[in-house]
Image: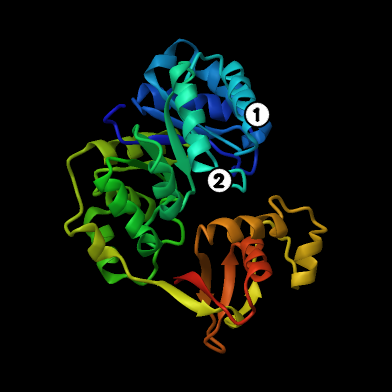
Amino acid sequence: MSSNKICLGLNDNFKKFNKSDFERIIKKAVSLEYKFIDTADTYYNGQLHEIITKSLNKNRKKINIINKFQLVEKGKIMENLNRSLKKLNTEFLDIYMPHWPSTFFEPELMCEQAEKMIKQGKIRFFGLSNFSLKLVKQFKKFYKKKIFIQNEININNFYSVKDLIEYSQGENIDIFSYSINNNFPKYNNLVKREKKTKKINDYEFSLYWLKSFHNIIPIVRTKKINRLIKNSKIINDKIILSKKPLLYCKNNFKFININRIRRISSESGIIYKSLEEAKKNKFNLFPSPTLISKEIKKFGLLKPFYVQKRKTDNDFNLISGQARFWAYQIVFKKTDSIPAIIVD
């Protein structure tokens, strides 16, 4: 794989879908020698695949395409892969990985499927997206080829993924990191001084911080050409942070009693106020709390919750992960503790 450690992220979080914006960004990223493009079958109902095809044109060999798929029953995985190859107008994908674990995850079986795809020349490498360290180790028991991982990694959640990073470094596993400046710390004085010295913003600091890890490749998302250029310069220049990456991190990963969650927020604006409402899932959240509860029962909780301390009573508000929050309560008792990252 390329040594250029930067990846263009293409997902469906942009509020307005504009084909020309995506085409312009992809073409510029290729000209800047971004070597990875990250997408998924589900983004904009698959429309991004067609835009990538049009934008790359004759430049397909200059880019490594990462494609994530929904982990479904055995018979449909090859069918899904063939559909993606057709939409992308390519004979192979560089990295193919399940987007999230599901109840269909069987390590030995998935290993056989991955090896079959590689043998047929339809993929070059296999990977795992949003898999816990425990599940990665289970898969690696059977799969001896190189794999790639994708996970949320940033200065704020470092202590919740520290073990995964260290394991990956020892196993020669590269990690694609998304949400690179999610919940950026507001009150870290060491970070503030570094930003001021280098005259950089939160996002730029996050890139400098991530490049300190030899096996982490940041996934950057933007609609602005000047931002693409700046991202590339930060990753490829020789300037580094003045301290070791760990020194900028605060251990805000804690276990808190679930009863201390007082209010629930949701980016979508859809909020269930009780466990019964969540079970009924009248707003058709997918995956539903009940479906997620089955995955939690099988694999455990894959990601911690993000919470914010309240000023009035010293309890917490949940700021993300509503469906997982209710799913957790379907599986466990109301008195149990939950893993949480406390946000400034």
Which mark identifies residue 135? none
Residue that carries the numbered disc 2 in the rendered image = 100
Residue type at mark 2 is Trp
Identity of the residue drawn at 61% across and 21% down = 50
Q: State which tag comes first along the sequence, 1 or 2.
A: 1
Residue that carries the numbered disc 1 in the rendered image = 75
Estimate the x, y position of residue 162 in percent, counting from the top left. Answer: 33, 59
Q: Tell me if 3 is positioned left or right of 143 in this view.
A: left
On the image, which quarter does residue 87 sit in?
top right
Which SS class for mark 2? loop
Image: 242 above or below 102: below
Image: 272 above or below 16: below
Image: 265 above or below 79: below
Estimate the x, y position of residue 137 in percent, counting from the top left. Answer: 39, 49
Residue 94 seen from this side: no
Residue lying furthest top in this view? Answer: 58
